[in-house]
Image (cartoon, rainbow, N blue to C red):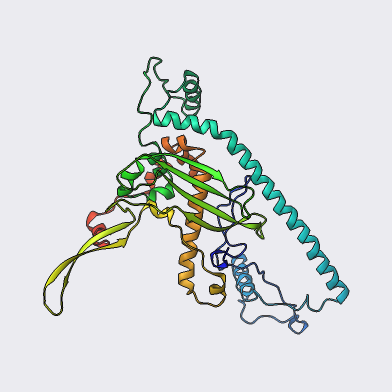
């Protein structure tokens, strides 16, 4: 695998079966820690003339210390270099011991992943059952409905049980997955009204893992669609790959993502907008209409993930800081969306469909009291051309 698709170790940390981190380290962030230089005896007893009379408050002291430490990052105090050679020998030995610790940690994470795969396999019959009910291929059993109503009563003491003679529906649950995805905060921001037409044909989302024989671990998200007027694909997939070894933090490190190439039908590409431009021939003065495409926001951009920058390009400074920061943000968002679909949407789909999951994400309708109406005229002044 070429190195230009790798992110340096420690950049983006993947979750383990026990823990899903909320934050990932940025691409440009290193693992170095500040070292504090020795206090010179010449300064002992001297008072800093820059300090205010009467000493520093807690906040002032914290700010001063933080500022001075920031200037020491990456600088050596000379302490390690000046250790006796027999002590340096011990330090090197500790590195060898830690190497064995790292090997055990890597083995532990691999075994955790195998355990995760095992229970994912055990869930398949339940996910098949869920799919059958959603699509209307099978009717729910009285026992399933009763168990569901127990949960509903627990969540809402005022819940009114359904009548016992309700007929079975042959339509299943229309627009189930579209509704579930829209009730996820981050996904709702990237699903446009144009996307909704295609996502109404989404019938299932499944999780699978890369084979244990593959050199690198990872997982795959599969989106299943009924035949539609937008694209020819029956399945759209997104594969997330981790690096072979665990990172500095002891977790798998994100490597890259690969998406399905969508086979759009003519004039149905939701990731592009088309505009008609008038052009004039300089020689004949004749005019013509030209149809041009430009990229646009769409949920389906999810299947064209950003590519991590080449480490060599970063080291040589060939990528501007602003460009690197923008790419870093795109990679983190893409990675987090994949993790949320894997860890939240797929296992808790009905909770996202009903909106119950929003309670656990800190979103409450009561927060409406914190907002006030905006004057429409002022609002219009801030936007042009519907942007």
Q: Is residue 70 left or right of residue 364?
A: right
Q: Is residue 89 left or right of residue 119?
A: right
Residue found at the far right of this picture: 86
> Which residue is located at x 51 percent, y 54 percent?
335
Residue 351 percent coordinates (x, y):
46, 36
Q: Is residue 363 visible?
A: no
Q: Is residue 17 above or below residue 160?
A: below
Q: Is residue 250 left or right of residue 194?
A: right
| Quarter of the rendering containing residue 39 | bottom right
> Which residue is located at x 64 percent, y 54 percent?
251
Q: Nearer the viewer, residue 158 or 76?
A: 76
Residue found at the far bottom of this picture: 42
Where's the C terminus, which quadrant?
Answer: bottom left
Residue 152 percent coordinates (x, y):
47, 27
Q: Is residue 268 above or below residue 131?
A: below
> Which residue is located at x 26 percent, y 61 percent?
383
Residue found at the far left of this picture: 285
| Quarter of the rendering containing residue 38 | bottom right
Residue 160 percent coordinates (x, y):
41, 21
Q: Is residue 315 left or right of residue 149?
A: right
Report the number of discs: 0
Q: Is residue 29 above or below residue 48?
A: above
Q: Nearer the viewer, residue 285 or 83?
A: 285
Residue 291 percent coordinates (x, y):
22, 63
Q: Nearer the viewer, residue 267 or 131?
A: 267
């Amino acid at each position: 695998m070429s190195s230009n698709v790798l992110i340096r170790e420690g950049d983006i940390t993947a979750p383990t079966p026990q823990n899903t981190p909320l934050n990932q380290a940025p691409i440009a962030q290193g693992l170095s820690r500040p070292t504090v230089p020795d206090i010179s005896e010449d300064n002992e007893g001297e008072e800093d003339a820059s300090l205010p009379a009467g000493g520093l408050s807690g906040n002032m002291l914290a700010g001063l210390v933080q500022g001075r430490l920031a200037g020491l990052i990456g600088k050596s105090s000379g302490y390690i270099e000046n250790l006796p050679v027999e002590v340096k020998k011990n330090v090197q030995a500790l590195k060898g011991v830690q190497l064995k610790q790292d090997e055990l940690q890597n083995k532990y994470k691999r075994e955790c992943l195998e355990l995760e795969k095992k229970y994912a396999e055990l869930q398949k019959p339940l996910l098949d059952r869920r799919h059958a009910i959603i699509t209307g291929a099978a009717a729910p059993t009285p026992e399933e409905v009763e168990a569901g109503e127990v949960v509903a009563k627990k969540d809402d003491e005022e819940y009114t049980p359904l009548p016992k003679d309700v007929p079975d529906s042959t339509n299943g649950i229309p627009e189930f997955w579209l509704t579930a995805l829209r009730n996820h905060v981050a996904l709702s921001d990237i699903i446009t009204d144009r996307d909704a037409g295609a996502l109404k044909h989404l019938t299932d989302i499944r999780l699978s893992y890369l084979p244990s024989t593959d050199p690198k671990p990872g997982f795959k998200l599969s989106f299943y669609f009924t035949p539609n007027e937008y694209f020819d694909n029956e399945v759209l997939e997104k594969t997330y790959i981790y690096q072979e070894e665990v990172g500095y933090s002891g977790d798998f490190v994100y490597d890259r993502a690969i998406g399905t190439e969508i086979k759009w039908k003519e004039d149905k590409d939701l990731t592009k907008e088309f505009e008609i431009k008038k052009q004039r021939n300089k020689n004949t003065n004749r005019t013509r209409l030209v149809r041009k495409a430009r990229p646009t926001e769409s949920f389906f951009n999810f299947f064209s993930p950003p590519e991590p920058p080449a480490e060599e390009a970063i080291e040589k400074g060939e990528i501007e800081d602003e460009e690197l920061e923008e790419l870093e943000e795109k990679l983190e968002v893409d990675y987090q969306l994949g993790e949320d679909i894997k860890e939240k949407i797929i296992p808790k789909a009905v909770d996202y469909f009903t909106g119950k999951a929003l309670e656990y994400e800190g979103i409450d309708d009561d927060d409406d009291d914190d907002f006030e109406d905006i004057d429409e005229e002022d609002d219009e002044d801030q936007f042009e051309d519907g942007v």
